[in-house]
């Protein structure tokens, strides 16, 4: 009986390790080979770089031939600003929808949730026209506005669920003391929403950082490209230069992996809404 | 939703309530309406117009849709993209969701060690950009590099290797499997969370009755997480019928070879933005987007009114 249990546990781990290899293998392969000289990339793709094959030539080329730092900066600005405003406006709206009942509040909540299921991409033709008319074409502002609109429905949905779990006594006590409504939100409620930030972050930051569609449609110059679009165009241009391609891919992968590993516990807890034991 | 109205709010003067609502709801409602709902409606409106050589537009009713669905110059690529998109979705349903369910089932086994590690690793590809995933697999599957061929030869299947991404018969399936590889983390995580919410008493009762882990999973846990599987399916549907990045990164706007990997997203992009073969056409692009909207709407409605209604939700 005991042996049988051990054997079964082992079989489970064999499957899980095999799948881990499948999930990690391609990423490791790309990152590993980005640090190798061209002949080693083709000669022995599966071996890690050693002193004779180590080379940073790909990275040197990426720095020289592309505006990778500008792309990084643009992606950071767009993601952080959109994320901050999605959280702020989303939390305010979620609070109002769950706290103040008024005629039409259910209809408004439904209206705001349309965007969860209907992708904003389908409105691209009109979005591009609007941005051109407003003179915002090829600016980061255009991207930020679109990403806020894209992130809000999910953020409001998640934050509303969260706000409903906050004990009523807290705000009622504050109200009895005559604290104004705006201060109740910003000083009592908002700090309590911190645990929900991770959940909202998974659903807003990741799609914004990784988005190719809107940068492709709304930005046309190097100075406004985001990292995803910048890398995509660089790769298309240098497709035969394997050193550069592998280096560019690794530079796009590594920051995401590092941040993900640091925050994976919170992110996953957020994703499974606190169900992770 | 039907919680009692707090006294203070009920007694609030109307003007004050309106002021508060404008302050709290204003920014979200304005930005969302202006940059999400309005463009969607404006796109639908634009789909009933056609461009003039001078630059203006004039109303043509549903003529764009008639062209799209019946004029062979348009309908042939449209139906090709639609068919490919259905295949793309079918592969996700047939491969991604069963693997996701199986991984979630294994991860939720009681007493499993290294749970956190596996969870983190399995979800990692989902965090990466589709562009990165597409290019990485493109290199790995490339006959030039030979990594995939080498791996197959090592397990004695070397003769199976073919330049899958370049063949008309396999390009679409290969791209779909690349996408499955990336997004399997989403069904896994959602189903895993649902499995954890099943109370221990139910599982313990079955174990006392002598059921093994596999039968407990199939007969007790799986039926209880069916609503989550339904949700995962509709999310997959919306994601697939809106997909674009992967195919554009790997195959370009022309979705080759010979449009074998063309789906609605790439077809929409080509129609709207133009490419080497044709000029961009905003009004026809708007028509394609409108058709995509109705396809997605049909899928979501099918889920909301048929699938979800039939399923019983259990709250513990």
Image (spheres, grey):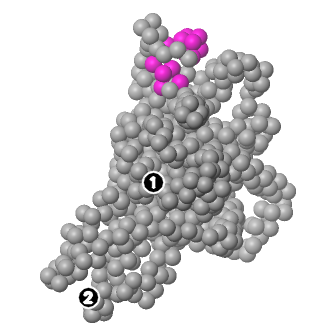
Above/below status of B169 relative to A267: above
Q: Residue, x 37% and y 73% (percent of image)? A: A164
Viewed as shown, does residue A83 lie left or right of B259?
left
Please tell me whether residue A243 belongs to the stretch shown in magenta. no
Mark 2 falls on what kind of element? helix
The quadrant the N terminus of chain A occupies is: top right
Front-most of residues B94 and B144:
B94
Q: Residue, x 52% and y 51% (percent of image)? A: B192
Viewed as shown, does residue A160 lie left or right of A116?
left
Q: Residue, x 27% and y 93% (percent of image)? A: B11
Mark 1 falls on what kind of element? helix
Q: Which residues are magenta?
A: A29-45
| 10 Å crowding of disc 1: few (<14), some (14-19), many (20+) | many
Give the residue at mark 2.
Answer: B8
Give the residue at mark 1.
Answer: A271
Residues at discs 2 and 1 both on one chain: no
Front-most of residues B254 and A11:
A11
Q: Which label belongs to residue B179?
A: none
Q: What is the x, y in percent for residue A94? A: 38, 72
């Amino acid at each position: 009986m005991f042996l049988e249990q051990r054997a079964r546990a082992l079989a489970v781990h064999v499957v899980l390790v095999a799948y881990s290899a499948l999930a990690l293998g391609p990423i490791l392969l790309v990152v590993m080979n980005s640090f190798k000289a061209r002949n080693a990339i083709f000669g022995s793709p599966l071996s890690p770089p050693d002193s004779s094959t180590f080379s940073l030539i790909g990275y040197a080329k990426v720095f020289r031939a592309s505006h990778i730092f500008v792309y990084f900066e643009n992606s950071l600005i767009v993601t952080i600003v959109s994320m901050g405003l999605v959280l702020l406006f989303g939390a305010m709206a979620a609070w109002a929808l769950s706290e103040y009942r008024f005629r039409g509040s259910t209809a408004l909540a439904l209206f705001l949730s349309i965007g969860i299921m209907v992708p904003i991409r389908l409105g691209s033709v009109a979005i591009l026209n609007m941005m051109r008319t407003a003179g915002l074409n090829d600016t980061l502002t255009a991207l930020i506005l679109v990403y806020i609109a894209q992130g809000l429905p999910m953020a409001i949905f998640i934050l509303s669920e969260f706000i409903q779990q906050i004990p009523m006594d807290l705000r009622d006590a504050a109200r009895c003391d005559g604290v104004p409504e705006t201060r109740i939100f910003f000083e009592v409620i908002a700090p309590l929403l911190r645990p929900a930030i991770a959940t909202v972050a998974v659903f807003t930051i990741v799609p914004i950082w990784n988005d190719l569609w809107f940068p492709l449609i709304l930005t046309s110059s190097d100075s406004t490209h985001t990292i995803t679009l910048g890398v995509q165009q660089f790769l298309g241009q240098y497709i035969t230069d394997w050193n550069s391609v592998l280096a560019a891919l690794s530079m796009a992968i590594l920051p995401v992996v590092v941040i993900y590993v640091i925050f994976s516990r919170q992110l996953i807890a957020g994703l499974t809404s606190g169900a992770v034991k | 939703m039907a919680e009692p109205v707090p006294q203070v709010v009920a007694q609030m003067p109307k003007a004050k309530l309106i002021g508060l609502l404008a302050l709290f709801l204003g920014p979200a409602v304005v930005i969302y309406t202006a940059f999400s709902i309005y463009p969607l409606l404006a796109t639908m409106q634009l789909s009933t117009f056609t461009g003039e050589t001078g630059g203006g537009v004039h109303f043509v009713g549903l003529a764009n849709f008639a062209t799209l669905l019946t004029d062979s110059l348009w309908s042939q690529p449209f139906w090709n993209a639609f068919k490919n998109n259905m295949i793309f979705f079918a592969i996700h349903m047939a491969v991604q969701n069963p693997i996701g369910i199986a991984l979630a089932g294994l991860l939720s086994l009681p007493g499993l060690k290294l749970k956190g590690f596996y969870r983190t690793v399995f979800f990692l590809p989902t965090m990466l950009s589709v562009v990165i995933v597409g290019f990485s697999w493109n290199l790995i599957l490339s006959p030039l590099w030979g990594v995939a061929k080498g791996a197959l030869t090592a397990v004695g299947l070397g003769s199976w290797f073919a330049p899958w991404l370049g063949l008309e018969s396999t390009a679409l399936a290969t791209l779909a499997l690349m996408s499955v590889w990336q997004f399997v983390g989403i069904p896994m995580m959602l189903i895993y969370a649902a499995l954890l919410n099943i109370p221990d008493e139910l599982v313990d009762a079955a174990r006392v009755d002598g059921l093994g882990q596999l039968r407990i999973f199939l007969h007790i846990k799986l039926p209880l997480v069916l609503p989550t599987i339904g949700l995962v399916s509709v999310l997959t549907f919306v994601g697939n019928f809106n997909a674009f990045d992967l195919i554009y990164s790997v195959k370009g706007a022309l979705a080759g070879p010979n449009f074998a990997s063309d789906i609605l997203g790439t077809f929409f992009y080509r129609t709207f933005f133009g490419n080497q073969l044709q000029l961009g056409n905003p009004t026809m692009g708007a028509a394609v987007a409108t058709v995509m909207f109705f396809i997605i709407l049909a899928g979501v409605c099918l889920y909301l009114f048929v699938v979800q209604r039939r399923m019983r939700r259990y709250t513990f």
